[in-house]
Image (spheres, rainbow, N blue to C red):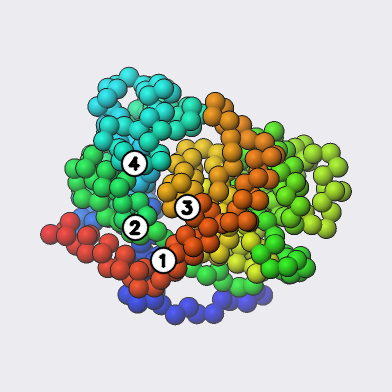
Amino acid sequence: MPKSSPPRLLRHGERSRGGDVDSRRGRRRAARGDVPVPGVRPYQPVRAAGAEDGRRRRRRRGARHVPVGGGQRAPRRGHAWRTKPCSGAYVMAPARRRLHGPARPTVYDLASAPEGFPPSSPLATVPAYQAADFSYVFKSFHGMPCVYDRVAACHNASDALVIKSCAEMEGPYIDYIAAQHGKPVLVTGPIVPEPPQGDLEERWATWLSSFPDNSVLIASFGSETFLPHAATTELLLGLEATNLPFLAVLNYPKGTDAEAELRKCTPPGLEARVKGRGILHTGWVQQQHILRHRSVGCFVNHSGLSSVMEGLVAGCRLVLLPMKGDQFLNAALLARELRVGTEVARRAGDGWFGREGVRDAVAAAVAGGGGGGDGEERKWREFLLDDCVQKRFAREFVAGLRRLKG
């Protein structure tokens, strides 16, 4: 019989069910859109005529219901809708529709920030391949509203916007979003992962412990980001070229034979050449445990904010290789503005990266940390782990919700 985990001491203001917004878990729920404004009944979607009444089975979810059209309505007012500072400011700002109207913006249009965007931002322009990726949110399928219009309807129907960030990290973008939407913006602060429970699996602990401190390179792209075969091949050859011990965690869409897919894109002879110092793995791993191991020093990732936070608070050097959507803007913010990561060089036209780009980015990160060196990484790590700062975020977020209630 598996051992039950020991009881956990509750943080200040946290309820045992984990639902109070005056806690890290509660703020995480709020940032997902699960916490409605106090005193207002959550929105329920419209049921089709004759549909079975599933009210007892349906979990109330507040303003997370996005669909507009197809017989459904936008969330009623009295809710806070979650948005992201960088991508919300660059891609989803109302200025996009005011400029282009109902017409779909071109790749050329999306290569530049919308009107009023912070002028000194390094995100004011993006390469063509990133702009082409952003155009997806303006594409309509089967006559349904596009992603932009669905999200805009939710923004318009909400009393406030919730942002999982803070003024210290993304102040100009938060201010721009508030000005664009003309409504309150509540910030939860960046949600820092709690220390992982339990121990690292013995096979990983034994392998990692065989290397010196801060010498191992981890490459992982989350459970929803999948690299094309050619990109995977270049990544693996780049990791090999670093001459560092490495663990590459590569996942594939559900329903595919992950092991077979990984074999297809593994360069011939690579496993023999890196035997003893390199591991290729597909499937779930204890990422937080691994990143916090003393032997791990560098983390190649897709610039998803959860992974970035895990790596940053673990003290890893960050190498940023975004693959889609807001990951591109996250990487630019981290590397060029906060200066806590190193971007892999890519071709501006199509976003292609090669093994040399991976090798050089890892070498730069290991040699000097992010763009600001150890000092910037240490500064932001201490800021994120400061318990007083996290409690301030919770207090201010709760106060903002109460002001909405009146």
Q: Residue 273, how many percent across, how many down?
A: 85, 48
* Front residue of 230 and 76: 230
Task: Bin the neighbour count of mark 2 within 10 Å (Cα to Cα): few under 14, some 14-19, many 20 and up.
Answer: few
Badge 1 is on which residue? 383
Horizontal placement of 384 versus 235: left or right?
A: left
Alpha carbon separation for disc pair 3 and 1:
14 Å
Residue 289 in view here: no
Residue found 30% across the figure and 29% down from its top = 96
Label number found at residue 168: 2
Q: Earlier in the sequence, mark 2 or mark 4?
A: 4
Residue found 48% across the figure and 30% down from its top = 127
Horizontal placement of 243 versus 225: left or right?
A: right
Task: Bin the neighbour count of mark 3 within 10 Å (Cα to Cα): few under 14, some 14-19, many 20 and up.
Answer: many
Q: Earlier in the sequence, mark 1 or mark 4?
A: 4
Q: Earlier in the sequence, mark 2 or mark 3?
A: 2
Helix, strand, or loop for circle 4? loop
Q: Amino acid at mark 3?
A: Arg
Alpha carbon separation for disc pair 4 and 3:
15 Å
Badge 4 is on which residue? 120
Badge 3 is on which residue? 339
Alpha carbon separation for disc pair 2 and 3:
14 Å
Helix, strand, or loop for circle 2? helix
Q: Residue 175, how many percent across, how many down?
A: 26, 47
Q: Amino acid at mark 4?
A: Ser
Q: Earlier in the sequence, mark 1 or mark 2?
A: 2
Kindly check if marks 2 and 3 are in contact, taking CB atoms under 8 A apart as contact: no
Q: Amino acid at mark 1?
A: Phe
Q: Amino acid at mark 2?
A: Glu
Helix, strand, or loop for circle 1? helix
Alpha carbon separation for disc pair 2 and 4:
16 Å
